[in-house]
Image: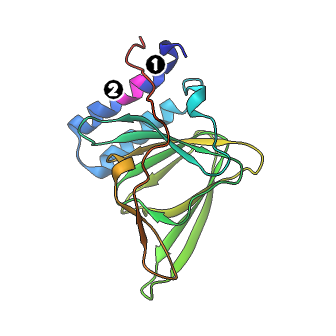
Amino acid sequence: MNSDALKPLKAFVVAFTHLVDCESDERLILERGTILLRELISDDGWLPAALAEPHPDHYLQNLLHCDVHERFSVVASVWGPGQGTPPHSHGIWGLVGVLRGAEVVRSVTRESDGGLTLGSVRTLRPGDIDVISQAAGNTHLVSNAHDDRTSISIHVYGNNIGLARRAILRSDGPDEPFLSGYSNATLPNFWLAR
C-alpha cells in the first residue's frame, strides 16, 4: 500500500497525541476524540487490505498504533460474519467508530446477586461512534450485525489495550481475567505519508 494512503491515520494519531498531551480530563478527551475519530472513519480507503481480512473462527484486534507512553492505542476490530464477543469489561475509556458494515452493541450490568443483566441494544452503522466510560458504562458485548459479510470498527482506548487486564463476565462463576493481545504481527507504517 502506498504510504500516502495512510495519511488519514497519521493525521489522526498526530492529533490524538496532541489531545492527550494537552488534556487529562476523560470527558474532554472523549468529547474531542469523538470529533477526531469521526473524521478518520468518514472514509475507509486508508485501512490496509491485510488488516481488513477476517479470520474464519474469531474476530481480530489489529493494532494500528500505540502511543509510546501507552496513553492510548488504536486498533481495527475485524468481525467476520456472525462473530462477536462474550460480555466483557474494559476498565478504561474508549471510543469505537464503525468503518464498514454494522455492529450490534449490548450493555451488560453486574447485579448485586452476581448475575448479569443484558441492557439496551444499539446497532452502529458506518460513521457511528460508541463511547466507553465509567459514566456511559464500560461493560458490554459486541457482534457483527451481518451474517453474510465483514464489519470493521476502529477503537481508541486510553491505554495499551492489548496488555490491559480485563475480564470476561460470567453469571455462573467468577469473572475470567484475560489479556487480549493483538492479532497482527506488523504495523502500518504511516510515518512516510505526506
**For residue 114, above or below residue 9:** below
Quadrant for residue 112, please give it: bottom left
Q: Which residue is mark 1?
A: 7
In the displayed structure, 193 sits above or below 40; it is above
Say which residue appears at 59% left-offset and 24% top-offset: 45
Q: Position of residue 21 (x, y in %)?
A: 22, 35
**Residue 46 placed where, x, y %?**
54, 24
Q: Which of these two is toward me, 182 or 67?
A: 182
What span is in magenta? 10-14
| Mark 1 element type | helix
Task: Indicate the amino acid at tag 1.
Answer: Lys
Residue sitting farthest toward the bottom:
113
Say the numbered circle drawn on residue 14. Answer: 2
Q: Quadrant of the N terminus?
A: top right
Q: Residue at x 57, y 44 (%)?
A: 128
Residue positioned most to the right:
148
